[in-house]
Every structure is written in structure tokens, then in C-alpha cells.
Amino acid sequence: MFQSISGRLMMGAIVSTIAIASSNASAQEKIPGEYLVKYKTNSFSTMMSLKSTPSLKIMDHHQIGQIMKVKLTPAQEAVALASILRDPNVEYVVPNIKLRTMLHSVSSTDLATLAPQDQWANKITKVEEAWAKAGNRGSRNVKVAVIDTGVDYTHASLKSNMITGYDFRDSDADPMDLTSAQNPGHGTHCAGSVGGSAIDGGIAGASADVSIMPLRFLGADGSGDLNNGIKAIDHAIAQGAQIISASWGATVPRAQAQPLIDAVQRASDAGVIMIMAAANDGRNNDKTEVFPTNAQFDNTISVAASDSSDKKASFSNYGVATVHVAAPGVDILSTLPKNKYGKLSGTSMATPLVSGIAAFLKAQDSSLTGAQIRAILQHTGAKTQIEVACNCRVDMLAATEAVLAKKMFITPAAASLATGESKQFSATYAKGALSYSVADANIGEIDATGKFTAKADGQTTITVTDASGATSTSLPIRVGQTSNPGGPGGPGGDCPLGDEMMCQIICGIMPDAPWCEGGGGGGGLPGLPELPF
């Protein structure tokens, strides 16, 4: 019924194996002198106040996020920051940082010689079987925003699924993917995994019929700034994207990532499913903060990378509390600019595959939320030993069968809570009244509405039964095994400016800054003089 992937792959190119160490988002990179000022309510008042601040230039104003990007003169940086922070209408100030792709390596051969099995990720996740089961390859009614380095929207395998996008890097309407040694075509590759159309035997994405919105904020070097990343997210929300695919980020303390976290929350609150790469540092994200992937909300999905043996990719980050599923991310064949194809590796590659699967599931049932799709993927995933919330790798056929059969399932499927924390459980595709039970009442208790309250460290499961007698049992609900970032890349302190010395200097100017000793009540740090203001 559907065109097989066994057709020819044309227009090959030879690309040697290259490790992209600089694109692993392994550390924050502050952009010198640039800060994002989040104001509370009155943009005019804040703008007037900022304009009166010595040695400050307003560079941009993002009204939806209530953020102004400012540039400070180095000699006056501390005094200017203290002045901004004293404004009662300023909520917080963070440095503008660089965000980078989650690309690990490039590895391909002469693409004219590639065989159909080279698209192994689709094979192992049973993409074509899911199409056959559903009787479709997705729907153009589902919009996926690929926020990235741009997309070659003229590519033969992509152009039929492209819709209007935008370039926040250059502030124009042309989100073309510009390549370099650092960027082989990252955004184009991601777009192919979401929704390559398989025209003329080309690459097939998980949802071969879909609408892809290309939003560029990362440049030809694979990096972009925090400010433009936030604007891209809000643009996707405003333009009606149901799903955002985000294969980029930075290892940065939570306090410095707050405007990005706020943007992810705006997406989740709007019902937009945001699917994010777990990063390529081989770290446990339960102990290391990486954003946006560690911004955990109802409609977010964090993705680790697996290999063809269903083991964790050596480079992939993981975490049972913070990473939800694993998906193929090693030697992934997809589209590259100028009608080429190639293999890339990274959690960058795992993420758009999950985005494509989510789009396909939305095409079968448009009412599904991000929380429900996350739960479906976890309930139906192929079991592995990969340390993610479900210890599983996504299986598109099994997920599709569950949706088409409207088989009842409990949401969330897995969770990690602190003692005393509560979590609301519910059931999808249930009939009539529900009853809930918990396997180990010593670990927690659940009331008649499905509200679970954690009581002691350990793990348990929760079962829901509907009026017809159908049941669904959760995966492990872990209590005490929660995200606790620390060490390199973790918060390690409350200074939001990315510069401990700068924060100490500001304590000397305004000792009531929240991060100063006695935070919020004055006192300053010992040994620092009171500076004039």
C-alpha cells in the first residue's frame, strides 16, 4: 500500500567520520556583556529604567517572554547589574548564553551504495508496520516545529511536507540550513527523521505525511543564543505547532536557564508537546542540569540515544528521574542539504524520531496530550537496560496498536518523587468510574481521585481499574530517587549570573541581593567593601 524504503538513495556524497566535540553542549558559554532581563508586568517602565542605566544598550525586546536583551560595558558591568536588579519590576537577570546542537558525530559512506537496512532506526521501531496498521503515514494536519540550524526546504525528500518558517538568527523569513565543518546540515537531518516523505526512494521519517515548520536560530557553527531560542519556542506556539523538536541545549545551572524553562512551560501550558535531547556527555541528568531537556512539565519528553543492539549509546546522557525514553541515535541515516543524505549520531538524532512518532500518534488521535503520548511510549516501549524512566526504547507499532485499540492506560506511566510529594494519576480510554490501588502502601498512598502521595523511599506501582473491569498498572513509581543536580554543570549555588566573582561584587554594592549571605536581608559577603552607588 505504501512506497517501500527499498528504493534508491540518490545524489550521494562521501563524508568521513568526524567527532563533533564542540557541539555536545557540555558547558555554558556566556556571550560577553549580554544579559536577559525578565520584567514582571510593566514593559514601558522597565524600558525607561534600563535606558537610564549607565553604559547599557537595549538590543532586543521579546514581549511574549517579557524579556529584554541588554548589552553592558565591561567597566560598568557590576554597577549596571546592581541598578537593574534594584528595579522592583525586574524579576531576574541572567547572562545570554550559547546553545548548541546535540550532535555527537558524522559517519557515512558513498550514499549511492547504501541499502534499505541502513535506515535501521525505522526498522527497529517498526515504522512501516505502524503505517500499515493505521492505514496512513500520518497527517498534514499535524504541525511539527523543528527548531534548529534551519532546514533545506527544497530537499526532494522534504519539500512536500514543508510549511512557512522563520529565521531568528538573521531575522528574516528564510530558514535555510547553512552548512560548515561544525554543521553538516543538522536541522535538515532532524527534519528528515521527523517527516522525510520517501519520495523517489528517499528517506522516510516516522511521520512521512506531516507539516514541518522550520525555525532557525542556530547558525552554521551549530550554535545560537538563548534569547533567539526562546523567541523560536514562542513563535512555534503562536503559529499553532502541536509538537516542538529540540535537539540542542546547554549544561547550565537552573538559575541561569530560567527564561528557557519559562518558555518550555509556556509551550506545555499551551498543550504543545516539546521533545528534547538528553545531551551527549554520558552523564546522569538526575545529577547534572541540562536545559531545555531538564525542564520537566506535563507535555515534555526527554530522549536518550540507543544503538542497534538496544544498548545506551556510549555518549548519551541518561537518568531515571529526568529522561523519559530512549530512541535510536547512532548512525542514523537521514536528509542533508542539497539533496544529499548522511549518517549522524547523537541524542539530536533520537529526538526527531520520537517527534515523528508523536506526530504520527497525534494523527491517529488528535486529542492525545504530551503526557499521554509519553505514557503510551513508556507503556509500549521495548524493554532495555537503558537508565531512563521506563528502561525502554520506543516501539512505534506497539504504540500505534495501543492507540487504535483505545486500550486503557494509566498516566503517568512512570514517575520519580520526593517523600511528601504528590502526583495526580489518571486513565485514558477508560470506561466509567475508576478505582486506584497502590502495590506497597508503605511507599505511598493514593486516594479515590488518583492523587498519590509519597510516604517513604522505595518504589511501588499503581493500578487503575475502570467500570468495565479493564486494568492498567504503572511502571515503577520511585520515591526518593529524584533529580538532585550538583557537581560540574549543576547549580552548586544561587548566583544566576554565571560568574561568582561578579555576584560577590554585587553583594558589596547591594547586600540584599537574593544570593548574598543572609539572602534578601542584607549582610553581604565578608571581606568585600561597600561600593558607592
Image: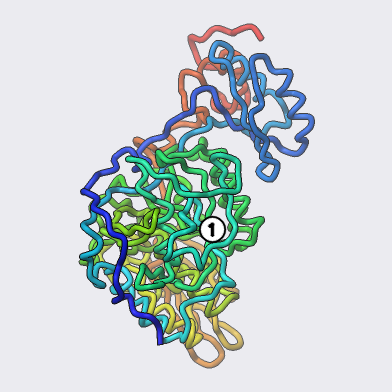
Q: Position of residue 481 (x, y in %)?
A: 38, 55
Query: Is residue 312 visible in the rendered structure shown here?
Result: yes
In this rendering, would 444 be left or right of 36?
left
Q: Quadrant of the C terminus?
A: top right
Q: Quadrant of the N terminus?
A: bottom left
Residue nearest the observer in this picture, 507 or 215: 215
Identify the image quadrant of residue 78.
top right
Q: Position of residue 110 (x, y in %)?
A: 22, 58
- The amino acid marked with disc number 1 is Ala
Q: Please, is residue 365 above or below residue 83 in the view?
A: below
Identify the image quadrant of residue 415.
bottom left
In this rendering, would 412 be left or right of 396?
right
Residue nearest the observer in this picture, 531 or 395: 395
Q: Position of residue 403 (x, y in %)?
A: 48, 81
Classify mark 1: helix, strand or loop.
Answer: strand
Is disc 1 surrounded by few (<14), some (14 to 19) or many (20+) residues within 10 Å? many
Q: Please, is residue 440 above or below residue 80 in the view?
A: below
Q: Position of residue 338 (x, y in %)?
A: 39, 54
Residue lying at 36% horizontally and 69% vertically, measured from the top left: 202
Identify the image quadrant of residue 424.
bottom right
Residue nearest the observer in this picture, 100 or 407: 100
Query: Is residue 413 visible in the rendered structure shown here?
Result: no
Q: Which residue is mark 1?
A: 145
Residue lying at 68% horizontally and 31% vertically, measured from the top left: 90
In this rendering, would 158 be left or right of 334?
right
